[in-house]
Image (spheres, rainbow, N blue to C red):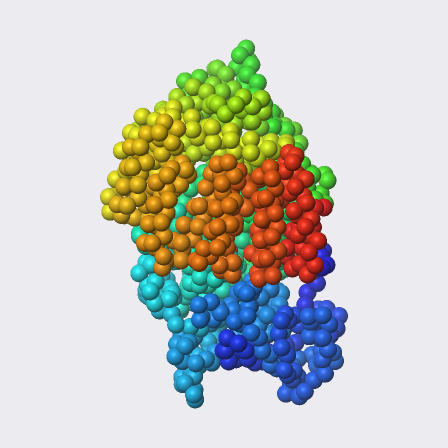
Amino acid sequence: PVAIRREDYRAPAYWIDTVDLTFDLDPAKTRVLNRMRLRRNPDVAPEPLRLDGDELNLARVLVDGQGASFRMEADQLVIDNLPDAFELELFTTCAPAKNTKLMGLFVSEDTFFTQCEAEGFRRITYFLDRPDVMASYTVTIRAAKAAYPVLLSNGNLVEQGELPEGRHFAKWVDPFRKPSYLFALVAGKLVAREQRIRARNGREHLLQVYVRAGDLDKTEHAMASLVNSVAWDEARFGLPLDLDRFMIVATSDFNMGAMENKGLNIFNTKYVLANQATATDADYSNIESVVGHEYFHNWSGDRVTCRDWFQLSLKEGLTVFRDQEFSQDLCAEASARAVKRIEDVRVLRTAQFPEDAGPMAHPVRPDSYIEISNFYTVTIYEKGAEVVRMMQTLVGREGFARGITLYFERHDGHAVTCDDFAQAIADANPDSELARLLPQFKRWYGQAGTPRLAAHGVYDAVQRTYTLSFVQSCPPTPGQPFKEPFVIPVNLGLLGPDGRELPLQLADDEAPGAGTRTLVLTRAGEQFTFVNVDAEPVPSILRGFSAPVILEYDYSDAQLLALLAHDTDPFNRWEAAQRLALRAAIQAIHAPVVGTSDQPLDQAYLDAMRRVLRDPGLDAAFKELVLTLPSETYIAEQLEVVDPQRVHLVREAMRAQLAAGLFADWEQAYEQHRETGAYSPDPRSAGRRALAGLALSYLCLAARATGDAVWPGKTLQRFKDAGNMTDRFNALQALVSSGHALAAQALARFHAIFKNEALVIDKWFSLQAGAPDRGGDILPLVKQLMKHPDFSLKNPNRARSVIFSYCNANPGALHRPDAAGYVFWSERVIELDAINPQVAARLARALDRWSKLAEPYRSAAREAIMRVAAKPELSKDTHEVVTRALA
Ligand code: DPP
Ligand code: ZN
């Protein structure tokens, strides 16, 4: 496989103006007639037409109605000697029922679906399958009426009718030009929830959510989320819905979460279906974000798209930022907004920071790839969103909205680059720091790696000054040994000895300012001196996580406790507790092992946690975040050399301490928060359920140590009586994760109740495969789960629920001294690669951080990766991941 490089970008030799597709759908052999109008691109030197194709059977090629000579070069169809403008007619067939890759046209539960991003359209017909070729599409779908009563494609339905032999057809015209990756087709037995809305500008729209017949009662939340999304994008950014009809269709076989095809979004059922009996609060919240995300792509992605796939973050980073802001704006209370921000940062730090420090590290705008599917990463998405967020911080919320307006004015209908985006935001704010620093700011797009920001504070009691100095650095990443300094906006506050916020006055300031101030760092090292500071302050640095960096500050425990107790910034309050827990974990990991009686947490920490739990002024959701320990993955990231078993044991010891040490407080927290009234997924009641659930899990854990039977009994009762899935699942989880004997009957009952609910059965599998390991018991269980009649490797959700929950999300169980976890991993990667390379390549990433492992893990993990790499006929996807891991 060859690498594709950003610097090699060239405009296409031809443009495609119109595409007229006719599908004769048949699962075994679908016929596709593709009539296109093409013209030579006058801006580039003449060359043959090269169309991409993949696993197609080509039957006919006509140029202006005449048989034409053509040749095949690898997967490309090449035609020479073409006129400047012409009609090209191609007739191909493909086999949707055999398409286990789920790219292109495939069949899921007797329904046809497509997935074309990034390069799936070439599996439907030969095409210039690149995002800068934008065409107008007309699509005619023909199929057996009884089996496929609903026929959908992008845009507007212009005609439908009967055909001989029980067949029928529908013809769709998309009023907007689009790249091929946004094409979509759906055909099958589906029903729709419909809602008509009138937008601010008076225009009427029909919104539809299509699902299988039994699932209609689970579409209310997705529809509500869609209605909110339409209103929000108009209100916040002035971006209206531009179509008469907007459709969402759910499928249970899908590689991604969802796909933003113009007017016809295709979703994984996981991000559509919810009712209170089957979905948790987390599911409700994910549905809201993903429905928002795909809808917002209608502008940031569809109306303005990417020139090439290196610009993927242009649409993904921006659209994640937009969906994060949407979810925050839907929160009625500021505290709920803060909780959402903490959750987003937690994802960034536990998933993206390791990626940025590992073999797959790449810039937000990568320089090369072998398989673009491997670059739908947390770096492109979440770090990309942080880059957009920093722009907003530098130009202000209103300035940013102006920038967005200018971006769409300039580039509507075009395929553009990350530079174009940053330029528009800067140009709309010519006096801003962003405009002044733009070339340097754009290093965030070009340089990979998480910057480290070391801060140090010195108080001068005589001068009454406080000097904060910062030194930034960024470690080498593959292909980038040296980094230039970044522009880092640091939101800062200072707390006085009594915990109150101090006024901030730099030497040059005429008057002090109140509250948070943004310092904009641009050099490797710099200093800021605050004047008129009456006593040594505690600095609250990087409030709201104003930049995606690792902040190092030598806080004393007392300072962290002060921040936890008093900071006005909720993010940094939470962060102070995380730092305390992390510090305790790291100390215990490095300490000599003394039997099994680890006590990593000290009394001051436990007392602080008790105060948080009992504080009537704090939200339940916030308490739950503070009382949740950093994950094993996050702890491991802080270490030079990782012994995963030691990390696991120390964290389990910390959990046991929190359980026993705060037993009475957990009882009280549970009793106070157990009732949430009629079910509603709003942040306040979800927060109450989250805290009650955490309390229950600690109570069961404590009971395990003491042999007490009361709390496990109560938990089982709660599991049985629960009126919603969140409470039910939390109770189940408390029993399973404490390893209590009652877990077995609860699991059996859960399966029996929900045996016909695929998404709930996924949870059932995932909970077991992801449970805390006790003496190596999880791997045998996982192998047993794979033999369960409900298990299937072909369904990505199901495969993920067992295999990923074990390999990618349960480090304490995967990393076994006997290497059996790695052997299992390598077998599954190879097995999956033959079915679905995209899913296999995700799984392949589970051992990304092998080089950090202590022996014997390190050598054994490497050996397992080499075993995968040595396999002949590996997909490009998996090949790229494992070769990078070994590089
Ligand atoms: N469907 C994926 C997303 O929305 C890729 N565009 O992020
Ligand atoms: Zn997206």
Between 867 and 638, which is closer to the camera in this rendering? 867
Q: Residue at x 41, y 77 (%)?
A: 147
Task: In the rendered view, tell whether residue 502 sits above or below residue 851.
Answer: above
Q: Quadrant of residue 37?
A: bottom right
Q: Residue furthest top?
A: 462
Is residue 761 at least partly visible in the picture?
yes
Residue 177, x across and y down, in percent: 54, 69
Q: Relative to 327, is 593 on the left or the right?
A: right
Residue 721, x across and y down, in percent: 26, 45
Q: Quadrant of residue 6?
A: bottom right
Between 720 and 204, which is closer to the camera in this rendering? 720
Task: In the rendered view, tell whether residue 873 sits above or below residue 710.
Answer: below
Residue 206, x across and y down, in percent: 36, 67
Q: Residue at x 35, y 29 (%)?
A: 707
Q: Residue at x 55, y 16 (%)?
A: 459
Q: Residue at x 28, y 37 (%)?
A: 714
Task: In the rendered view, tell whether residue 515 sits above or below residue 28.
Answer: above
The image shows a total of numbered marks equal to 0
Q: Relative to 798, is 375 on the left or the right?
A: right
